[in-house]
Image (tube, rainbow, N blue to C red):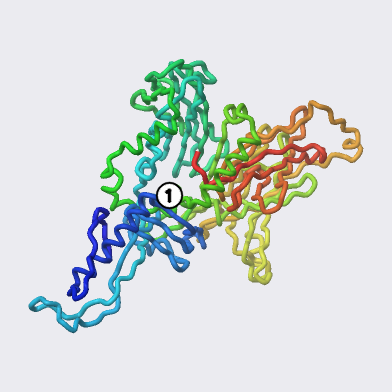
Amino acid sequence: MNNKQYHIAERNNYFLGKLMTVRDFLSEQTYFNSKRRLGNRMLGGPGIVAGMDIFLIDDKTFNLDTGLAFDYLGREIVVSQPCVRKLNVIKGFEENKEKGTVYLCIRYKEKLEETTFSVAGSGQIGAEDKQHNRIKEGYELFITSDALEESELKIDGLAHHKIKVYNDNGIKIHMAFPKYANPGKTVKIKLYFEKEKIEEPINFSFKISGELFKGTHGNGTIISFKESEVSTYKTFEKEYFLTCTAQDSSSAEFIIDRSSFNLTAGKYRYEIDKSITVPVSVRAEDIAELVVGDYYSRHFDRIIENVESKSIYLAKFYLVTDKLNYFIEGFKKHPFKQYVYSNDLLRLMQKINYDVLKSYSSDTEHNSAIETENIDKKNVETFKEKTFVEKDNIITGVEKINLGFNAKPGKSYYSYELVHGLGAGPVGIVAAVVDNINDDLGGRPVLVFGDKSIFDEDKMKTSAPNSQIAAVLNPEKGTFRLGVRLKSKTSAQTVDIRWWAFRPIQSTEEKENLIIDDSVKILISPNTARVKPLGQVRFEVSITSSNDQRIKWEMAEKNTGNVDSNGLYTAPATEGVYEIKANSILIPELNASAYVVVSSAED
């Protein structure tokens, strides 16, 4: 029964000898469905209750795991079997594929099953007596390019203003401001940045000012971002803290001055049309009580009406397409975090928050800006084969460079900026093309150095694209980029490059003469961070009073996540507080730790 009404408060009255008709049985179903769904909607809320994990099988296919969700009408959406589908067979793909960024959604759907015949007839002249014996509850997957506003998905709008600072040319800069502030207390504002299908580096800065709010720059603070590792897709979040200097209840505002806004994408410069003003109410009352009061002041119709068109968003896909083909360049699972928290999960999160508060002082909590960086680019998630192997002063890895469709001979293609892991200073870079499938060697991969055409007549002939490889090193930053120029036509859409970075090994005699004093320290930034389960955060490290900046990252305990040689930490599915260690390669006994709080709780 595809019932959308909540307000039915009428049920059957049974008595001996009552004549039951179709109307009575339908009324019975409608009554109990409406009551249950209203409870789902109001007590749990819309979103994923459990499961519905999604991941990529290859660059065209995804897997949706089993799970349960409530839609915006409180109807249960059950995925009872894992669902493996190519993206192009999903409804709405053809209409939206050219837009580059699309969303996979799920919605409740019913269908009639078990054809049978009515022994009493349909009751209508000329109508068929064929009927259906069952109504099967199920779901439907579909593709859309329309993103939902966050204010439409959650009740966060009761506590925060989500403001669009800039949203054009593939660049989104949003800010979240509190609706309320307490006199003399700290308030948090948050930056949300996203770029899509832009190869140029993004840099921006602007000032947020407020007469009653003191920050790092007088009455306000500077919001800034500089992209050091350039990628086509990127999301970035950062928190800032201001102190409310008001002495009593008052009306105030945050101002983003148009003249202070500076945004560049490579050589292009963009502006905002006008200054932005965001109101904030300074109140002496407890903010939680104010928000609860606002919630219960809302009209009930605002909560339950106009929600039929809203759906559950399962994934965000970044596509590369032409007229005949496509592939998934990257994806983000559950992009709007539409989750329904069970009581057990809420109790766990409360315990984690309590333990964290006991572990860290309030000064650390207020003065440390927590940064999270999730880079969705061409070699992310399941395609990312960037495995590092480190031995002495040699580090190696594999970088996948995308050639796109119809790769042209003579054209150059480039990797993103890579951190080699040997620190600042001169290092050597060697690179080779990887032929992953070589029939002459039993299907084992081979490496091609130099001009591949020399081996065209040899038994070790390879199928890898014939290309020239070059590397550009930035000794100050400890980074490099790889470049490939095709020398012949190829049908391949990507090319794998194996690279080695090396520097001369310091002699044992020199190591024995090393003296560690108090000035030689390892500094990790941030020293504490908070991420969602399976989320990512990047840590940066420096060694004071030392020219050797080489670091080896590791987890303090097993099954607490993974950290790569660039300091990119990937959280496990299990919530908790985990320790990450940075060890000096030159001085093994020199190390430092950072801590990550893995929690699904909203900030």
Task: Please identify the residue farthest to the bottom as the structure is shown.
Answer: 119
Task: Please identify the residue farthest to the left as the structure is shown.
Answer: 125
Assess disc 1: are there few (<14), some (14-19) or many (≥20) residues with their C-alpha within 10 Å of its C-alpha.
many
Q: Position of residue 202 (x, y in %)?
A: 49, 34
Residue 603's place in the image compared with 254, above or below, is below
Give the structural element (helix, strand or loop) at label 1: loop
Q: How many marks?
A: 1
| Residue at figure coordinates x 44%, y 44% from the top left | 197
Q: Quadrant of the N terminus?
A: bottom left
| Residue at figure coordinates x 76%, y 47% from the top left | 394
| Residue at figure coordinates x 67%, y 53% from the top left | 559
- In the displayed structure, does residue 550 sit left or right of residue 202? right
Question: Which residue is nearer to you in this view: 246 or 390?
Answer: 246
Residue 129's place in the image compared with 337, above or below, is below
Q: Position of residue 179 (x, y in %)?
A: 40, 29
**Residue 463 visible, this angle:** yes
- In the displayed structure, does residue 62 sit left or right of residue 32? right
Displayed quadrant of residue 115: bottom left
Q: Amino acid at mark 1?
A: Gln
Question: Which residue is nearer to you in this view: 401 or 236?
Answer: 236
Q: Position of residue 359 (x, y in %)?
A: 66, 36
Question: Which residue is nearer to you in this view: 537 or 366?
Answer: 366
Q: Position of residue 55 (x, y in %)?
A: 51, 58
- In the displayed structure, does residue 298 sit left or right of residue 527? left
Question: Which residue is nearer to you in this view: 410 or 491?
Answer: 491
**Residue 96 visible, this angle:** no
| Residue at figure coordinates x 38%, y 41% from the top left | 155
Instruction: Give the residue at mark 1.
Output: 338
